[in-house]
Structures are given as C-alpha cells and as structure tokens.
Image (tube, grey):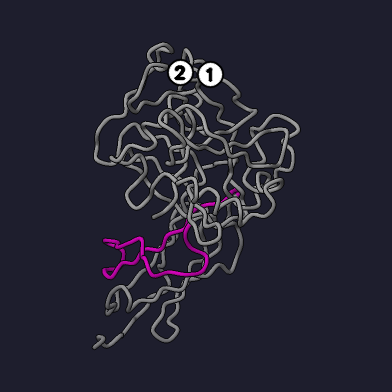
Amino acid sequence: MRYLFILFFNCAPLIAVAQLVSSVQAQQEGQDVVVSYTLETESLVEINLFVSSDQGRSWQGPLLHCTGDVGKNVSAGSGKRIRWAVLQERELVGDGIRFKVVAKAAVVKPWLYPDMNYGSVTDIDGNTYATIQIGRQVWMAENVRTTRYRNGDTIPNVKDGGAWGRLTTGAWAHYENDVQYENPYGKLYNWYAAADRRGICPQGWHVPTDAEWTTLTDQLGDEGVAGGKLKGKTLWRAPNTGATNGSGFSGLPGGSRNFFEGTFNALGFFGYWWSASESGAESAWYRNLGYNNAGVNRTNYRKRNGFCVRCVRD
C-alpha cells in the first residue's frame, strides 16, 4: 500500500546551482514531479536533480528515478524537463519542498562517438569506462587501465624488456613505459593477466572469448567493413580506412609489446585486443584493427605479447 502523496511547492526560491542552470520551475503531474530548467553550456554536461524538504537547509540526491533531460551528455537549451517518479523513491510531504538542478562538466573523451548513448562501469582502481550496447552484448568502449585484479591482488608492472619476454604470469606495461599513453590507450597486458581467474575486469564483466568476439563482428556485417564500424575516428594514422565508429566501440590504435625482448610497436597504426581463448599451449586468439583497412583480423599469437584488453558484460 502506497502512502498518500501530498506535495506543496514554494516555487519562488527554487535553486539553480552553477551559472549553467537557470529558470528552474517545478510542478506536480499526477504522482510525478516535473522540473523544467534552462541550460547554458558550450559542451555536454551531466545533469542531476536534488530535493530538500526543509527549505534548502539539507539536500538529498542525486535522485534516481528520473527521465528526460538528466544524466550524462545533456546539451544546452531552454525548456529542459526532468520527470521524477516520486513514489518509486520516497514519500514527499510538506510545505518546505525545494529542488535544485546540478550541472557537472562531462569528462571530455574525443575518441568516443558523441551521438551514442554510453553507460559506464568502474574498476577496482576507480577507473571509470564508457560502455556501449552492441546488439545483445554490452562492451567497454575504452581499454582497460587497472593495476589490480578484481580480488585486489596487484598485477605487476614489468618495464624491463628481457624480463617481459620470459614471463608466464600476468603483467602490464604502458606503451614505451611512458604513462602519457595511459589515456586514451590504456595499458598493454600479456595474455596471462587477461585470462587470470582473479579477473582483470570489473565485477559482472569478463574478457571476451574468441566466440564472443565473433558474435560482435558478425552482427556488424561483412568482415571487410566491420572493422570500420569498430574504429574510432581520431588518433589513427591516415588514411584510417573505412572508419565510422558506427557501433560506438571506439577502437584505438594502442599498438603492442612484443614477447621477444619486450619491444613496442605500431602505436597509431594498429590496435590489438586479447580474447580469453587459447589456441595452443603458448598462444591465444586476438583481434586487431588497422589504419589501412576496414576489416577485423582474427589471429593467434604468443601469450607473452602485450595487447590491449576490452571487457564484455556477463
């Protein structure tokens, strides 16, 4: 049984925070509250709605059961509307109700496709990744950057080339051992780290199998054009053949680290991503995209190589 819903608004002092938001008004529509506002911004922002029941002395939120012009990637404009399904979240009774609309600048990631509806997931290190639904699968739209497995164990950072080439346990490296490549390319991991049972992906996610990669590419059409739908439009060397990023996957040319002497190769030209599937005692399947073609290449190579990692939702 629901509580009686009685809502009193004093609209005069409704609050807008930051100079981005103005003209905030609220009205009751049935059992919902609709908050309208004007947003002035030169870039996409994240919008959240907060409520106070004591005339603004304290605030609760961000409110969860909201639809409309709320959440990530909200653009400028007047007549913006947020519909809040009040009774799904709380009983709201009183004469001191206030609302505020908070605009927070979005993190600029120019390698993502701006028209896509991205979600997000956060790993054990606190890194937040954009995610995208492609068919029935949900993929990370960025490369993994974690330094720890899901259980908290450290993944070693192995900088020495000779030591890297002898490894049969998990490790990672930045391209050229330079942290400047962390964003946007992520880290390079050997297969032992990617496939470790402790989990390199956030809770509820995993490194895709060879079959899951095939599911992804098959639903994007002919293998000769599927790569273009997976490639981002920026950071690739010319001609970046066929790149549309039509899937939102936003694949980048993060290069690789060779198992032989730990040398680094192909940044800007090729992107390589592990699967969790072995092809032999010392090799595993991976996918790669190239600057000079629109295809997706399925190949197997030594587990000691360093490639990028993407995760897919369980």
Stretch of the chain drawn in magenta: 42-71
**1 vs 2, front mark:** 1
**Picture coordinates of residue 75, whole percent (x, y):** 59, 57
Residue matched to label 1: 264
Say which of 192 and 266 sits in front: 192
> Which percent across, then down, holds residue 296?
63, 42
**How many discs appear?**
2
Which sits earlier in the primary sequence, circle 1 or circle 2?
2
Q: Residue 177 carries which label?
A: 2
Q: Residue at x 68, y 42 (%)?
A: 295
Give the crowd class for mark 1: few <14, some 14-19, many >=20 residues within 10 Å: some
Question: Was residue 256 drawn as part of the magenta stretch in this picture?
Answer: no
Residue 52 part of the magenta-drawn span: yes
Q: Position of residue 79 (x, y in %)?
A: 58, 69
Quarter placement of the N terminus: bottom left
Q: Find numbered disc 1 in the image and state the secondary structure of the residue it sits on.
A: strand
Q: How far apart are marks 1 and 2 (CA)?
A: 9 Å
Work out which quarter of the rendered image holds the C terminus and state it: bottom left
Under circle 2, the secondary element is helix
Towards the viewer: 204 or 125: 204
Say which quarter of the image contains residue 147: top left
Amino acid type of the residue tagged 2 in the rendering: Asn
Characterize the magenta stretch by its predominant secondary structure. Answer: loop
Q: Percent x, y for residue 123?
A: 35, 43
Picture quadrant where residue 50 is located: bottom left
